[in-house]
């Protein structure tokens, strides 16, 4: 069964460092998303991406964040200068149509900022 | 501002019985609701959804009920099985799209043998 894959599974970084989280969405999906879950809190929407551009972003997704689809398969989330409060599990998700919420999530990348 | 609320952080149910997970929402613009299940160290997995034009949707052991006037939905699992032990997230969206799904905090369902 096709799945969304994410790397790395866990990254530890120093505050102020740049981090890139990578995702390979399901191959025939057209809509891509990043969500995050801070430990003990709810899953929060960050950004959605379609047709090589951001279609929607939340207040969390400030200038420190960026997304890119550098080739036909990868979808990346970059955090330019990490802060302690960026420590969270980051989930990539994709779906084929975009008009239903049936997202397929990856297993997540745990980011720990020290 | 919690637009989607799951007031029970955990729920314990005996195997074979019915599990009922509840979710309330405040945003009247929400028109599409979903339930996701999450095991530890895995991403959320889609379970079942319901559009605001319906009040019930059933898929096997899972049924979602929507009460628009009360801004309340519930997920029923019958019969509950040990593999159902997981965290269940309620999510909602406005405009029927997947952009900006708003999640609740989740309910940890524990199925006891």
Image (cartoon, helix red, strand yellow):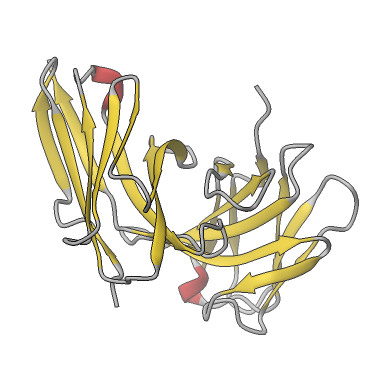
Which residue occupies the foreground of this view, B105 or B97?
B97
Which residue extends farthest right?
A71
Q: Left or right? Give the position of B84 relative to B113.
A: right
At horizontal 69% and vertical 43% (from top left) the residue drawn is: A96
Residue shown at the point (89%, 47%) measured from the top left: A72
Q: Residue at x 13, y 39 (%)?
A: B11
Residue B10 occupies which quadrant of the picture? Answer: top left
For the residue pair B44 and B99, the one nearer the viewer reads as B99
| Depicted B94 relative to depicted A104: above or below | below
Is residue B21 toward the left or the right of residue A104 in the image?
left
Give the vertical position of B68 relative to B41 (above or below).
Answer: below
The outermost residue toward the bottom is A63
Quarter of the picture containing the C terminus of chain B is top left
Q: Which residue is found at the position 75% from the left and 49% from the top? A: A30
Q: Position of residue B88 (x, y in %)?
A: 31, 42
Which residue ends up furthest to the front in the rendered image?
B53
In this rendering, would B112 be left or right of A22?
Answer: left
**Image coordinates for residue A45, horizontal then vertical, percent:** 51, 64
Q: Please identify the quadrant where the N terminus of chain B is shown.
A: bottom left
| Quadrant of residue B17 within the rendered picture | top left
């Amino acid at each position: 069964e096709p799945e969304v894959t994410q790397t790395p599974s866990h990254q530890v970084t120093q505050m102020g460092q740049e981090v890139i989280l990578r995702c390979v969405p399901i191959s025939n999906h057209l809509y891509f998303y990043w969500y995050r879950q801070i430990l003990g809190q709810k899953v929060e929407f960050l950004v959605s991406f379609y047709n090589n551009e951001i279609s929607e972003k939340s207040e969390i997704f400030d200038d420190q964040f960026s997304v890119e689809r550098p080739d036909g398969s990868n979808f990346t989330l970059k955090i330019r200068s990490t802060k302690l409060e960026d420590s969270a599990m980051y989930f990539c998700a994709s779906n084929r149509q975009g008009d239903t919420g049936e997202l397929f999530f990856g297993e997540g990348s745990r980011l720990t900022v020290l | 501002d919690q637009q989607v609320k799951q007031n029970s952080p955990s729920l314990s149910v005996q195997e074979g019985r019915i599990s009922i997970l509840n979710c309330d929402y405040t945003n009247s613009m929400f028109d599409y609701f979903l339930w996701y299940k999450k095991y530890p160290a895995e991403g959320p997995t889609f379970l079942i959804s319901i559009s605001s034009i319906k009040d019930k949707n059933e898929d096997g052991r899972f049924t979602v009920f929507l009460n628009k006037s009360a801004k309340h939905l519930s997920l029923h699992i019958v019969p509950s099985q040990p593999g159902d032990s997981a965290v269940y997230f309620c999510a909602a969206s406005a405009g029927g799209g997947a952009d900006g799904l708003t999640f609740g905090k989740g309910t940890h369902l524990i199925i006891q043998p």
